[in-house]
Image: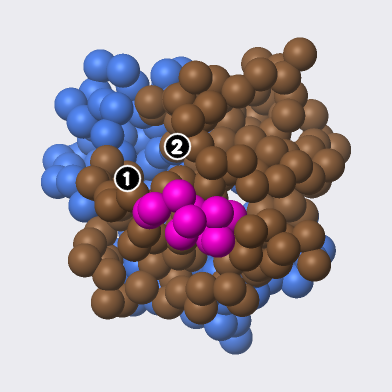
Chain colours: A blue, B brown
Amino acid sequence: MFKLHPNLTTKEYVTDLNLCRVLMENNREFPWIFLVPKRENIHNMADLAFEDRLTLMREIDVCEKAMIRLFKPDQTNVAMIGNVTPQLHVHIICRFQTDPFWPDTIWGRPGEKMTPAETNRRKLLIQQEILK
Amino acid sequence: MFKLHPNLTTKEYVTDLNLCRVLMENNREFPWIFLVPKRENIHNMADLAFEDRLTLMREIDVCEKAMIRLFKPDQTNVAMIGNVTPQLHVHIICRFQTDPFWPDTIWGRPGEKMTPAETNRRKLLIQQEILK
């Protein structure tokens, strides 16, 4: 049975797609979501069945384009890292040439949390744009 | 016409697949390759045609599995960042729980170069394993 790793249960729930659960990082500066395939014991992309990998690619594409339309980033960073959380999750992060860490990567960098109202507003925006 | 970005021409050439050119980072500690789709003006994965995205997914899979068989990493990091080099390139990096930066990401970290003989040996190993 699919179960979120404890490190992912603290993320904000956005929506469910056919394959993936979409979660959001609570980070004011960076619009940042995760796609987590709803399958058991998936560590790397290589663990997914072929059909699921194709679906993952489609869902990444839908979500990346939604984030680009919404936040107009200069660059999206799309990554599967997994060094800290050993359950496959795809980061999609909006980056801006004016952001404080540009052009460095931002994993492990501190981030400022949003208020509950801001969090809900951004989650709803992302959910609506993905499901459009 | 497909042309490598100047930041990618300094990488080691490994092989050509149907869609991607495979390059290698000269880094002794980390077995690290790049997949570069041989298409013009591709910045993000979202710029690729649907068929090309499916091929990219297959080629990532083939290369990731080859790297796992060869180097037996604890984790692979698969990422499209593009903040510094605005031509789509997919990083596939082998990470080990014993490596000096684990579990942090290693973009922007210094690396030790291999000798030309070591470089050629690793390139050949990777090429043979990918084309198997």
SS for callout 2 = loop
Inspect the magenta stretch and tell me whether residue B1 lies in it: no
Q: Which residue is drawn at 55% across and 61% down?
A: B121
Q: Mark 1 points at which residue?
A: B107
Lateral position of residue B60 relative to residue A128, left or right? right
Disc 1 to disc 2, C-alpha distance: 10 Å
Chain designation of label 2: B
Q: Position of residue B83 (x, y in %)?
A: 39, 27
Q: Position of residue B4 (x, y in %)?
A: 60, 23
From this view, report whether residue B38 is shown above or below residue B105: above
The label shown at residue B81 is: 2
Badge 1: residue crowd in 10 Å (few <14, some 14–19, many ≥20):
few
The magenta stretch is: B114-123
Q: Residue at x 72, y 19 (%)?
A: B2
From this view, report whether residue A71 is shown above or below residue B114: above
Foreground mark, 1 or 2?
1
Front one among A87 and B68: B68
SS for callout 1 = loop
For the residues labelled 1 and 2, say whether their Cβ atoms are less than 8 Å apart: yes
Q: Residue at x 62, y 64 (%)?
A: B125
Query: In this view, which residue lies farthest toward the bottom?
Result: A1
* The N terminus of chain B sits in image quarter: top right
